[in-house]
């Protein structure tokens, strides 16, 4: 199965540049109403004991600089999420929130301040999350908090200069930004502490009336570094089996929150490094260590094991920091770019009769340029996914869901995949902002460019 699986990833990447030749896909990448009314998009879904009012999920986008300096969500963050809940989204997810700051020195600055929101710490911080969750609930939406054990090798290497501490990873890995800076392996003791902190953060989230937790296990962040043999090359360690850390984390969370609390997991089907770089994986120094990436078949088996430990819901994509454009597809990439990925996962779960601890089929959320209601509806009708995750389209138009439900598709302000006005904001100390989307779209409209891009 492995050779077939890897052929799947390579074939998917090779055809990302010719999607304009597929007339049906091209037509679906428009704001039309061919499939209105959107009966599947606005049907309810049960996840564990939670009932979502529709199939629209607000995807995670970094909430940097939207919290007080010690991590309490500020009013800007609350209104940011509430506006999307008011806009009709069924499930809101936060950007990544560290479970603690002791294990990864890149998460805080020298004086303990942070640009990350936090959930560990104090009742002062907790009260911000309670206020956020209650405001989201007032509009009929639910809220999951996305948790991460850390950044690892993709964290800011300034920790070496300002704290005199090396960044961390699963093994000795080069820092992404400055490969000459090594990232030291976490000790087993540190790993166990991170797992305990994840359990505590989840218990705290439940107490704050947050509806579920969402583990950030993709894109080469620390959880994936521990759960992917590309990064985890440990020997003589309890965590040398690359599945152990993730499985024990889910097991700890499930033991702390009980059987009825939803656990979601974000994972990439493949880093797609070998499919992206081919022979260069053997020649480029910064890539050589990562040749033994997790294969598709291994990912699917890992997902099955995660379900046994308590995961209720997945969203799946491809890629990591070394091929950044994949998990953050720009405007030239296909609409519905990862629908074949979500379909593959759904088929695997169904064929193997894998169900949650609540006895339910495992829903799979599709992600990647799905901001066209016709495309989203057809994907659900065709059984390619169970939920539609929208991230940047909900920055462009917080009322996307309400407008789609009412058939006001022509009124939707579309996301055009403008990386400079959106993703690049994070690099320069800002945050993703809706006004950048609307300004960019205004420029496109003045230029007379079709919304099909």
Image (cartoon, grey):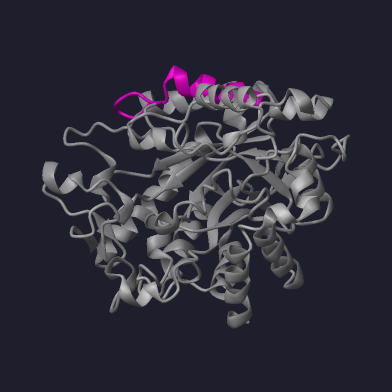
Side (left or right) of 144 relative to 176: right
**In the rendering, at what x and y percent does residue 243 appear?**
46, 69
Evaluate whether residue 363 shows in this view. Answer: no
Magenta-span inclusion, residue 84: yes
**In the rendering, at what x and y percent does residue 83 appear?**
60, 21
**In the rendering, at what x and y percent does residue 254 appear?**
53, 54
Residue 360 in the image: above or below residue 26: below
Of residue 80 and residue 207, the one placed in the foreground of this image is 80
Side (left or right) of 353 relative to 414: right
The image quadrant of residue 184 is bottom left
Evaluate whether residue 129 shows in this view. Answer: yes
Q: Give the range drawn in magenta.
A: 66-85
Residue at x 29% of width, y 78% of height: 235
Indicate the quadrant containing the C terminus: top left, top right, bottom left or bottom right: top right
Residue 58 in the image: above or below residue 239: above
The image quadrant of residue 297 is bottom right
Residue at x 43% of width, y 60% of height: 224
Of residue 321 and residue 71, the one placed in the foreground of this image is 321
Of residue 248 and residue 169, the one placed in the foreground of this image is 169
Side (left or right) of 259 relative to 45: left
Side (left or right) of 97 relative to 370: left
Residue 121 in the image: above or below residue 352: above
Magenta-span inclusion, residue 381: no
Residue at x 24% of width, y 31% of height: 113
């Amino acid at each position: 199965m492995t050779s077939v699986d890897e052929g799947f990833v390579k074939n998917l990447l090779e055809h990302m540049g010719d999607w304009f030749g597929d007339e049906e896909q091209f037509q679906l990448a428009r704001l039309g109403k061919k499939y209105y009314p959107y009966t599947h998009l606005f049907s309810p879904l049960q996840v564990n004991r939670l009932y979502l009012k529709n199939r629209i999920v607000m995807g995670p986008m970094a909430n940097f600089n939207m919290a007080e300096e010690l991590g309490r969500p500020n009013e800007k963050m609350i209104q940011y999420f509430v506006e999307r809940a008011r806009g009709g989204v069924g499930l809101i997810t936060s950007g990544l929130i560290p479970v603690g700051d002791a294990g990864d020195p890149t998460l805080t600055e020298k004086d303990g301040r942070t640009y990350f929101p936090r959930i560990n710490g104090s009742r002062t911080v907790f009260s911000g999350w309670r206020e956020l969750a209650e405001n989201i609930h007032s509009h009929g939406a639910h809220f999951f908090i996305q948790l991460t054990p850390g950044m690892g090798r993709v964290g800011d290497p300034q920790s070496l200069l300002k704290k005199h501490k090396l960044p961390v990873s699963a093994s000795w890995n080069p820092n992404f930004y400055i490969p000459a800076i090594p990232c030291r392996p976490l000790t087993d003791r540190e790993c166990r502490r991170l797992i305990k902190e994840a359990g505590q953060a989840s218990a705290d989230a439940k107490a704050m009336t947050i509806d579920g937790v969402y583990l950030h296990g993709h894109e080469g962040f620390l959880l994936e570094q521990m759960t992917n043999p590309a990064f985890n090359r440990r020997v003589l360690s309890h965590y040398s089996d690359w599945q152990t850390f993730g499985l024990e984390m889910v097991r700890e969370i499930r033991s702390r929150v009980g059987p009825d609390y939803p656990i979601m997991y974000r994972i990439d089907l493949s880093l797609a490094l070998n499919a992206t770089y081919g022979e260069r994986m053997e020649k480029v120094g910064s890539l050589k260590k990562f040749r033994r990436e997790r294969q598709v078949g291994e990912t699917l088996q890992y997902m099955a094991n995660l379900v046994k430990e308590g995961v209720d819901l997945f969203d799946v994509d491809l890629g990591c920091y070394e091929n950044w454009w994949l998990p953050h597809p720009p405007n030239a990439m296909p609409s519905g770019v990862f629908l074949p990925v979500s379909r593959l996962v759904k088929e695997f779960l169904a064929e193997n009769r894998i169900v949650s601890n609540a006895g339910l089929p495992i829903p799979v959320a599709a992600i990647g340029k799905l901001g066209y209601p016709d495309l989203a509806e057809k994907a659900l009708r065709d059984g390619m996914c169970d939920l539609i995750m929208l991230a940047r389209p909900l920055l462009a138009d917080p009322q996307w869901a309400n407008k789609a439900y009412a058939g006001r598709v022509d009124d939707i302000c579309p996301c055009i995949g403008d990386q400079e006005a959106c993703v690049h904001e994070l690099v320069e100390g800002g945050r993703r902002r809706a006004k950048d989307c609307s300004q960019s779209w205004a420029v496109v409209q003045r230029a007379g460019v079709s919304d099909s891009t």
